[in-house]
Image (cartoon, rainbow, N blue to C red):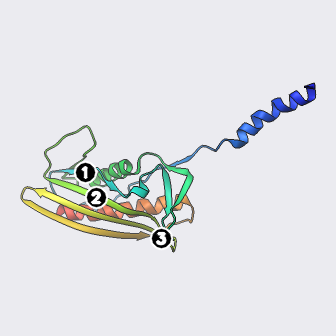
Amino acid sequence: MPLARRQFVGLALPALAAACSSPEPVLYAIPMKPGPVLRGGPKVVRLRDIGLAGYLDRREIVRSSKAYKLGVMSNDWWGESLATMLSRVIVLGLSQRLPDSRIYAEGGAISVDPNAVLGINIQRLDLDASGELELVAQVAIEFNRPKRNAARSFDIVKHPPTPNVSGQVAATGDAVAELTDGLAAMLQS
């Protein structure tokens, strides 16, 4: 092989490999916004592992589930498992909103005898056909002292501040904060 051709091949192969590699993913986290501080509530609350709709249980951010199609962002990922992140964020939010209560996640290292056990199923967390973020959740609480139950469904819609993934994540944070406000009110009553 002539020298010029070998030099071209030697330079072209690394450039070709770089062009074919995918860019690093952008990682996102859901923030918890502060909410109203409520007095009272159970002394110890255990948050069960969050139930997540199967289509949401992936590292990529789901943009939408409209028109029978799942819109998934191939290079925009959650920074951790979505169920784990939601659990962590909700524990932080409930701890701020209910300072008289101690909130622990089921999957953590701390095992407690709770006064209340909180279960959450997230059935939807993506953009609807009009571009609004929709969070649909079912919540059940088992109070142990005295023994009683409470259950409620939430359907929260938030407008993303921008039409991109960052806007969707910001709206998700707003929706999770509103859900956490509702959870705190349920636990306090």
Q: Residues within 10 Å of mark 2 (few under 14, many from 20)?
A: many
Q: Amino acid at mark 3?
A: Asp
Real-space Cα separation, disc 1 to disc 2, in angstroms: 7 Å
**Are circles 1 and 2 on residues that touch, CB within 8 Å?**
yes
Q: Is residue 82 left or right of residue 74?
A: left
Q: Earlier in the sequence, mark 3 or mark 1?
A: 1
Give the SS element for disc 1.
loop
Q: Nearer the viewer, residue 134 or 182?
A: 134
Residue 40 at x, y percent in the picture:
16, 58
Q: Residue furthest left?
A: 146
Q: Amino acid at mark 2?
A: Ile
Q: Residues within 10 Å of mark 3 (few under 14, many from 20)?
A: some
Numbered tag placed on residue 48 in the rendering: 1
Q: Which residue is mark 2?
A: 120
Q: Quadrant of residue 146?
A: bottom left
Real-space Cα separation, disc 3 to disc 2, in angstroms: 21 Å
Identified at 60% across, 43% down, the residue is 24
Q: Amino acid at mark 1?
A: Arg
Numbered tag placed on residue 128 in the rendering: 3
Task: Please state the total of marks drawn on the protein image.
Answer: 3
Residue 152 at x, y percent in the picture:
24, 68
Q: Is residue 28 above or below residue 168?
A: above
Q: Earlier in the sequence, mark 3 or mark 2?
A: 2
Q: Nearer the viewer, residue 42 or 3?
A: 3
Res. 165 visible in picture: yes
Q: Residue furthest bottom?
A: 130
Res. 40 visible in picture: no
Residue 21 at x, y percent in the picture:
66, 41
